[in-house]
Image (cartoon, rainbow, N blue to C red):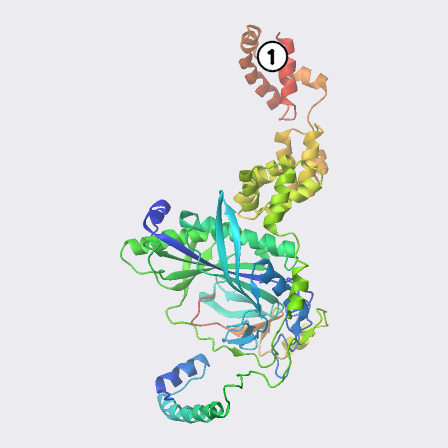
Amino acid sequence: MTDRLLDYDEALATFDPVLGLEVHVELNTASKMFCGCANVFGGEPNTRTCPVCLGLPGSLPVVNAKAIESAIRVGLALNCTIAPWCRFARKNYFYPDMTKDFQTSQYDEPIAYDGWVDLELDGETYRIEIERAHMEEDAGKLTHAGASGRIGDAEYSLVDYNRAGTPLIEIVTRPITGTGAKAPQVAKAYVAFLRELMLSLGVSDVRMEQGSLRCDANISLRPSSTSPLGLRTETKNVNSLRSIEAALAYEIRRQAAVLSSGGRVTQETRHWHEEGYTTPGRSKEQAEDYRYFPEPDLVPVAPSAAWVEELRATLPELPGIRAARLQAEWGFTDAELQDVVNAGALDLIEATVAAGATPAAARKWWLTELARRANEAGIELAELAITPAQVAAVQALVDAGTVNDKLARQVIDGVLAGEGEPAAVVASRGLVVVSDDGALSAAVDAVIAANPDVAAKIRDGKLQAAGALIGAVMKDLRGQADAARVRELILERLA
Amino acid sequence: MAITAAEVARLGELARIRLTAEETETLAPQLEVILAAVATVSEVAGDDIPPTSHALDLVNVFRADEVQPSLPAEAVLAAAPATEDGRFRVPRILGEEQ
Ligand SMILES: [Zn+2]
């Protein structure tokens, strides 16, 4: 990585960022977009293909009704207009991830367009305008064989077409202005919102780590909010909420450094690397020419107003409304709720509460201890190897006095390390708090005997000195004691 | 509509067809004739005839979201020039960074 970067605050003091986000969502239909092959993640390569998704000559695609239904519901939830008549188009390109040498997509007739969503961030509302949400199919999966696994030094590539033909919705925003230094957070909040939205609609499992929600983040800088838009870069491979924020912050600093030194931003695709930087990909100086034309194998889609209204009636409680309801139920402040939403923890906390924990306890575990571990591992909260039910079980152990907070953290260690359920970890690691007063008293007596000076101070009324003795007892008992009870015992003896 | 040799070269590039300079020179006027022939259609079609992309007057031809059996992987791969680990093996992809 050799990019020069400007300090973030300095970059924002000099330039006004403009965002654009393209989000691909894989629909969770049972079958693929144009054929009956099963639509599931992974599996043995090339076991879910047929003449249609392999693009064999003479095969005829037929549109999956459920995919259209999902696309219309997504469009409605994004406050879009639903096209009364639209077509699929062929997007022609040559790349081995598509056997047909074209991708079936929509071009100038998207099924949904002109929508908006409002995002709340730090007490401000940001309106994100949706230009379009269109339907298309996913491509196959390439593996590059070679020294590094990178395409540059690949000897050859291997292709698995299981994913080819998976229904996708691509949601494209209009340029997002007025976010200033918050641009990366707004982008993250937007994608977090879309993830919640898709979950509440039940149209996708939106697992970013499996690629069922993918984000391409465009950003450009301009000298001021009244200047024309600058040249933009499109960063791909941003596959977690954290990466979206980090990748955009990086691009702001990089572009600002280029512009500040009198340079010109190259309009190009860039790739995000989890190590924290972007590298240039294809240059977009020459506009791509996909020679789109209407797909002759598919007839137009013309959703009737009655069908659209029927689908509108099926829209569930949407994320904003749901968040507001949960906030009221849980008694969280606006700031607390915002932290939960931005951490992508709403579902996790809801499930933890459903499993018996109090909202406050659920929030405490997910947003502190578990958030720290997810951060360290560079993964999303939901990817941690602990379930909401297990978190609730840990809290139940604390409430029952079986373990204290410190031991609870060790229980979490055990669960994350695959040692089983919380109760099993407690048993196998011997983590139970020593509640037997006999054992506690013996430990307290031993510590008092070993520290006569400190004991004398406490006898003289310097109660704050008790801390040293409590610490020593806790150490002897390997943390497996209730500190408050230890303090009581010490003060009783030295009264 | 005048078609230049440069335009033919660009089309060749997009279609991944290698054309010599002589071929682009020869094809340019030929494509011009073809385009002119197709353009005569618009002379016949009046303002009351909308452009169409399909011969059938149908909309909303859908299938139910039901899984059908896929082809066996062996049969699928048997048609490939080269395979490895149950996947299609394709030549190194040049000129593009992923
Ligand atoms: Zn298929």
- Viewed as shown, does residue B58 lie left or right of A373? right
Please state which of residues A218 and A391 is positioned toward the viewer in this rendering. A218
Residue A417 seen in the figure: no
Q: Is residue B54 above or below residue A15?
A: below
Instruction: Residue A132 in the image: state x and y as whole percent.
Output: 52, 64
Note whether A402 is above or below A34 in the view shown.
above
Image coordinates for residue A80, horizontal then vertical, percent: 56, 62
Question: Which image quarter holds the N terminus of chain A?
Answer: bottom left
Q: Is residue A20 visible?
A: yes
- In the image, residue B68 above or below residue B36: above
For label 1, the residue is A448
Residue at 55% from the left image edge and 17% from the top image edge: A468
Which quarter of the image is occupied by the C terminus of chain A?
Answer: top right
Tell which residue pokes out farthest to the front in this image.
B48
Does the residue tagged 1 have its C-beta within 8 Å of any atom of ligand 1? no
Q: Amino acid at mark 1?
A: Ile
- Numbered label tally: 1
Q: Residue at x 41, y 59 (%)?
A: A279
Residue toward you, A178 or B15: A178
Question: Residue at point 53% right, 86% down?
Answer: B48
Residue closer to the observer: A478 or A305: A305
Q: Nearer the viewer, residue A64 or A45?
A: A64
Q: Residues within 10 Å of mark 1 (few under 14, many from 20)?
A: many
User: Residue A148, how many percent across, how many down?
Assistant: 48, 61
User: Which residue is most to the left?
Assistant: A262
Identify the subunit bearing mark 1.
A
Q: Secondary structure at mark 1?
A: helix
Residue A221 position by quadrant: bottom left
